[in-house]
Image (spheres, rainbow, N blue to C red):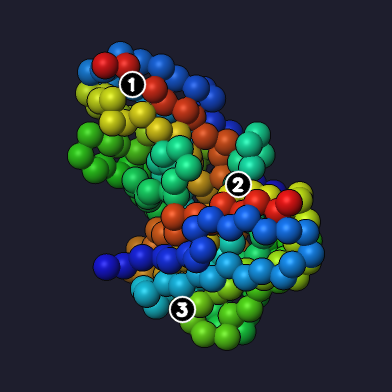
Amino acid sequence: EAQVTQNPRYLITVTGKKLTVTCSQNMNHEYMSWYRQDPGLGLRQIYYSMNVEVTDKGDVPEGYKVSRKEKRNFPLILESPSPNQTSLYFCASSLGSSPGGEGPQHFGDGTRLSIL
Amino acid sequence: KQEVTQIPAALSVPEGENLVLNCSFTDSAIYNLQWFRQDPGKGLTSLLLIQSSQREQTSGRLNASLDKSSGRSTLYIAASQPGDSATYLCVGRDSARQLTFGSGTQLTVLP
């Protein structure tokens, strides 16, 4: 089954303790991205990656890191989490190109992070 | 930078009604537009994707249209059901593969 898998789904942790949220897709998609969703602010892009070893900042990259060493994986790293990073996070992927245009975005089920 | 607006923010209708959700965008050079539904605390489920070269897409009771010249997209839901209750998001993609999300329309279909 084609899917985007995020882990963990839920995490409660403390300020300053490094954490990684993994994202994996099994569709051989080139494009992957991370978003955070906050009440009243909607979904905002954190980082995105056009392909392996190519990453770029989105709208709200401060406090986050990403890497794209393999096509299928795009982990989100919080080196020193702070309470303002408490949010619902989504990973997404899409095919770079297909006949007729780019394919649809596929989203993971989300990761709810609480930073105390 | 692309801006995407959805009106109304919330909508409540009785079961069986046909309804239209609206999405407007500022940059007519949109690459494609995708409609999603999101259930509370859940991820985004793709409903329909319209490429810039297309005018509409249909899937079951759903029909989405795209009018680049006016900067509008609509999602038509026929014969609404309580199971359609969710937040509906439209998302525009530009040529640089950047996504811009609308703020969503929260739909409640009353039995």
Q: Do circles 1 and 3 both sit on a common chain?
A: no
Residues B110 and B60: in front is: B110
Q: Which mark is residue A112?
A: none
* Residue bearing the label numbered 2: A37
Image location (x, y in percent) of residue A45: 64, 56
* Residue bearing the label numbered 3: A72
The quarter in which the C terminus of chain B is drawn is top left
Image location (x, y in percent) of residue B15: 26, 17
**Image: A75 above or below A13:** below
**Image: B65 above or below A19:** above
Image location (x, y in percent) of residue B17: 27, 17
Q: Which mark is residue B109?
A: 1
Residue A23 visible at all: yes
Specify the farthest residue to the top. Answer: B14
To which quarter of the image does residue A47 belong? Answer: bottom right
Image location (x, y in percent) of residue A19: 66, 69
Q: Residue drawn at (57%, 45%), measured in percent from left and top?
A: B101
Provide the secondary structure element on which disc 2 rests.
Answer: strand
Query: Badges 2 and 1: C-beta atoms under 8 Å apart?
Result: no
Q: Amino acid at mark 3?
A: Arg
